[in-house]
Amino acid sequence: MKRLIILALCLVMVVTVAACGTSSNQQASKPAESDGQKVEIKFFHRWPNEPRNTFFKEAVAEFEAQHPNVKINMDCVLNDSYKEKIRVLVSNEDLPDIFSSWSDSFAENIVSSGKVKPLDELFAQDKEWSSNILESQLGAFTFDGKLYGVPLTIDGKAFAYNTKIFKDNNIEPPKTFEEFVQILDKLKKAGYETPIIEGLSDAWAISHYIGTINQRLIDPQILEKDYNPKTGEFTDPSYVTALKAFKTLTDYMGEVATAIDHETARNMFANGEVPIIYMQFAEIKYVEDAGMKDFAFFDFPPFENGKGDPHALTGAPEGFMLSKNAPKEAEEFLKFLTSKEMAFKFTKDCGQLNAIKGAVTSENASDKSLAAYDVILNATRTVPWFDNAVNINIADAFMRGCQSMVIGEMTPEDVIKSVQQEAAKLRNSAK
Amino acid sequence: MANKKMKSSHRQKLGLSGSFIMVLLILWAVIILYPLFWMIMSSFKSYDEIYSNVWSLPGQWLISNYATAWEKGISSYFVNSVIVTAATIAGVVIIASLCAYGLSRYKSRGIDIALMLCTAGMMVNPQVCLIPLYVLLQKLGIHNTRLGLILPYITFRLPLSVLLIRSYFLSIPKEIEESAIIDGCSELGIYSRIYMPMSKPIIFTTIMLTAYYAWNEFLFAIIFIDSDKLKTIPSGLMNFRDALQTNWGVLLAGMVISAIPMIILLIALQKHLVRGMSEGALKG
Amino acid sequence: MKQLKKQITPYLFMLPCFILLFVFIFLPLIQNFIYSLYDFAAFSPTKTFVGLANFKALLKDKVVVTGLTNNVRYAIISVICQVFGGLILAAILEDKLFRRIAPFFRVVYFMPVVISISVICLLFSFIYHPQIGLLNNFLKLIGLGHLAKPWLGLSKTAPYAVIAVSQWQSIGYIMMLFIVAIQKIPQELYEAAEIDGASKIRRFFSITVPQVKETIFVTTLITITGSMLVFNEPYILTKGGGPGTSSITLAVHMYLSGFFKDKMGYASTIAIVIFVITALLAVIQFKLFGGGEED
């Protein structure tokens, strides 16, 4: 009897191996062969969820219909797994032909591997396509004077506030940071235990605050020097002031804040529980879907003694990059994805604003999104997300340090000290 | 048969201490079951209701969550998960039991070292193996294939399974072995005709422990597989998550659907954990 | 010839297992030893040889101390809850009194094991939620509202909240292993003791415990090893060991160093340290238990 079972198990194994063998022959993605046969392109992005998954699937299908000799193998994994996988792929000569990417230091890191294709030539050759792309968003993908990525989406972050609650309490959006704190006080007295909320367990949410506060408060020349890993020191006392400002805000967020994530925080805003939250324009759709209509944005107010540009907007594009050996067809696909028609469809289907001129209109964007679009276009400059503006070790020291600071285990001075230590390590290794 | 007779004639009253223990057992069962009950309840809720009415029954029972979860997150990946899990189980049961046999029957310095080496296999974090394994799978040509998942899965379960099966094998009485050897049984014969049949409880436990690992594993499943056609359920369930928002209701529905085969397997296997199996062999 | 055959036979049985172990686990492990001597990120075109610099940095790294502390907390609590708790639960369920309803409890207690860890972490993030969470609301219900806290948000409670989740999931696992072991104990031993007038508790300590010595050894080994390598629960529940680094474990620190802070060499160094500590602990356990033998 036992022999039979063992035999059966062996059979299962053999069959399985056979099945795997055949499927691997069908599924092995070979590097593209441009010799009249089917050209296979590997396309990798970070949105396995709806609605973007369907959008990209349809884009792939349409492109393949237009180019019958091309086959696109699409792979998509979520956010964190995406960051994992792209690192595994880039370390292995296996960078996909076309892949999605955040801008600034994230993109810069991948470019530093030497495996990403510069796009200046492509831009120069096809002016009809390239002139349609918002110039203000290209800088985030430009490194060492060369362009390496094409933005598809743009974003910005500002304070979303409940217009009804503000009206009921006779509050106007603040013009300075100091006014902002007074408003928070007023709301607290009016009975809102946490007039502002954030999910501080999400370290990136903290980094967004730090980035904007630093930019508003601190002299941009100091920032430029410190954000560069070769010269960064973070010795200016205004960094401590910036952290103290952040602590002032978190004092209004309650004990809850470090125990929840950003999504939970946003839901507290969307159901009317909390009047203010620092939010990305990309989240407008989520709040609207939750049924909330009475909200608007005010930009992060400037500090009275702030040295930074008060009209800069924190926010960054996201787009696509090509691997060094990507075939011509991958370039075509890139242009296809960032064409006016596809960008228009993208915003219509997925809700986020795109970086292509004329592809955001009232036909594919809600009023609030259109208003956000104007804010982005009118900003004097876009400020990258903090964790993409500095070396990740600096960002991590800030983010973790702030979590400890909020629960009272570190002082702002302690946090800056740990940042300075990280900066010293970076300067030393850059020599 | 004899057991049944014994049971009915020894029907005991619970008594005070017995009742107290019973209460504790039920309490722990509630602590286990309530969160699971919550999971099922929430899988019928809409996104907003999950956040606004966390602990109450769904106002509206959204069976559509299950339809969406099945359609977009599970159906195409179900077969892959079954194949990968079944092959992993087969591999682990055969290879681990063979190894455990070798480790339990003999004693020597070499065996001791082998045992420790095998155990050492348990002490390596899969995360640090990502890049080396990826390169390896590429070189072996099994990257982006089911086999590329199955082999690492089997390997990562071997140390634990070997330890468990070996400890069970150790308790098989020597008399049985000796009589088999006298009967002229080969080593392989002793293994297959005596040890394995007598070890059903640990084999079934191994099957269960391997099954849930392979079924729910997501680190390798995401990194080593690119093609949508080959992805397993954990990859599929990602389709409901996003950086800024997750479709919790549908995701939970997907997770419930995904858990059902495992629970069915559990119920089916644990029937075999019946007292008296080894006693039969001893008396016979 | 027959002597030789007898000598190599056990190794033949072990061969397939060791081939797989070597290729898929030991080769990567050796790779890690090599990587730990370099400094590089996943996207670095070249690796920089730094010798023992990573190890020196590790000795000064305060996060490693926090991580290790949490791993030790994990190990101690897990052994108490899972090994002792599991053994007691198994003994209870195998007792004649409860044997008829034991199958029901066995399935229930084991269910958390078969459920994906992502689900469990999701469940518990709702249970631990400061305002709408089950735990705090329950405490308020039984009049202990003053104990309600933001469990995952305070550095004092976060590590323990994470450890508790693992216990919830794994007690049934270890319990099942003990049930299998207890079932092998010949009934006659218990009957003889009962005739001699030994109480249930006495029987537990003089018969059950010695008879499952080997399983106690294996489950302790598994539990401690698991505690040293634990990654998923702290990573998912507290988003990587927060707040700050209070609930971080060595494995999370290792992963973040490699895939987040882009210091792959350092990540390998931490991996080596985890391996060495765990192996040392295992050797100690092997020596203490004598490698397990039938009495």
Image (cartoon, rainbow, N blue to C red):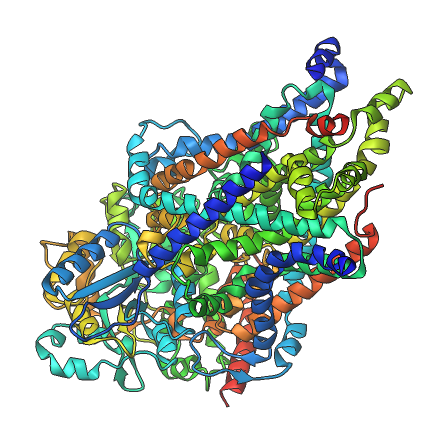
Could you tell me residue C14's position as x and y percent?
66, 56
- Image height check: is A96 above or below B16? below
- Image height check: is B224 above or below B166? below
Could you tell me residue A429's position as x and y percent?
52, 85
Query: As drawn, is B243 to the left or to the right of C224?
Result: left
Q: Which residue is at the front of the view, C49 or B142?
A: B142
- Image height check: is C153 above or below A356? above
Count of number-bearing discs: 0
Could you tell me residue A96's position as x and y percent?
31, 69
Q: Which residue is at the front of the view, B80 or A412?
A: B80
Q: Residue furthest bottom?
A: A431
Q: Quadrant of residue C172?
A: top right
Query: As drawn, is A19 to the left or to the right of B279?
Result: left
Q: Residue furthest top?
A: B9
Answer yes or no: is residue C128 visible: no
Identify the residue shown where x is 32% and y is 39%. B70
Answer yes or no: is residue C170 visible: yes
Identify the residue shown where x is 36% and y is 82%. A114
- Image height check: is A346 above or below B255? below
Q: Quadrant of residue C201?
A: top right
Could you tell me residue B44's position as x and y percent?
35, 32
Q: Which residue is at the front of the view, B30 or A92?
A: A92
**Which quadrant does the C terminus of chain C fall into?**
top right
Q: Residue furthest right?
A: C196
Q: Which residue is at the front of the view, A24 or A158?
A: A24
